[in-house]
Image (spheres, rainbow, N blue to C red):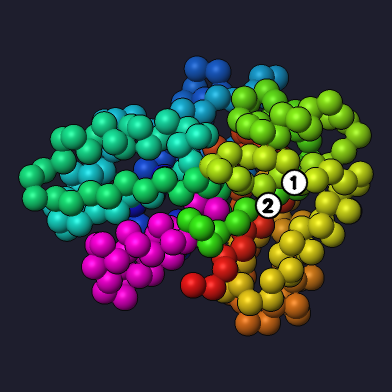
Amino acid sequence: MTDSTCDLSAERTAALGVTVVPLTVFFGEEAFLDGIDMGDDAFYERLRHSDTLPRTSQPSVAQFKGAYERLARESTDIVSIHLSSRMSGTINSASIAREDIPAGVHLDIIDSYNTSVGLGAVVVEAAEAAQRGASRSDVVDVARKAVDRVHLYAAVDTLEYLRRGGRIGRASSLLGSLLSIKPIVHMEGGELAPLERVRTRARAQDRLFELATADQTISRLYIAAAADAAAAEALAGRVRPRLPHTEITVGSVGPIVGVHVGPGTVGIVTVARA
């Protein structure tokens, strides 16, 4: 199980047998369940015309209880992998809900220390192990090791959304030059941290290409963009000839992460070989 910040497609989570608990995005007093009531395209279209920044909310304890109860009717082993506890209280909700799971059910809650397709990459590694018939303890081991193998980098078009959304983490040091740079950030210790600054969007895309192809032995590469599918596909087109033996997935940054990074952000996730 995971949460909707994993930014994996519904088709992929269904194929992997992964249950997704949605977070909620609020436009004023209107609440939308991520991926259920509102998809990516509808979200970014509304964001463009919104005078105020939407809010996001972690899944409730009741949502987790319901999900765990449904899964417990199918299996006594549940592995629940979620976005970084340093960015959201989602894991806290899951931990409280764990207190009421049925007797005999074994539940492991894992902090990915990541978000978006960084979380999604950890989920994929664990889910594929489960599909191969691995035991619960082995699936947990795969997930925990994947946390260290997964690396997320993003070129943020503007820091304004991170600043307004309060999820800027250690990247706050970049705020002094909001208008003059295109920051490259990465996940470090479960939160966003500055990696470097570049002057143009073109240079930012070049830097993502360099980061994506620096280690040509990686097993997987994920590319995701916030309301900029063309940029994601263009980057994938550049990368594929350099990484002919790497599985490359191109997707979208969903509403929950999109609230905080803003349109135009392009991210990559590299997965080192086990």
Q: Can residue 205 be seen in the rendering of this structure?
A: yes
Q: Which residue is drawn at 54% across and 42% down?
A: 190
Q: Which of marks 1 and 2 is nearer the N terminus?
A: 2
Pointer 1 residue = 195
Q: Which residue is drawn at 91% across and 44% down?
A: 199
Q: Position of residue 29 (x, y in %)?
A: 50, 17
In three-dimensional space, the C-alpha distance between marks 1 and 2, rounded to whole angstroms, equals 8 Å
Q: Position of residue 57 (x, y in %)?
A: 46, 28
Pointer 2 residue = 153
Mark 2 falls on what kind of element?
Answer: strand
What kind of residue is marked 2? Answer: Tyr
Q: Is the magenta stretch mostly helix, strand or loop?
A: helix
Q: Which residue is drawn at 89% across and 53% down?
A: 202
Q: Where is residue 14 in the image (x, y as percent from the top left)?
A: 38, 61
- Magenta residues span 118-146
128 up-or-down from 4: above or below:
below
92 left or right, relative to 157: left
117 up-or-down from 240: above or below:
above
Mark 1 falls on what kind of element?
Answer: strand
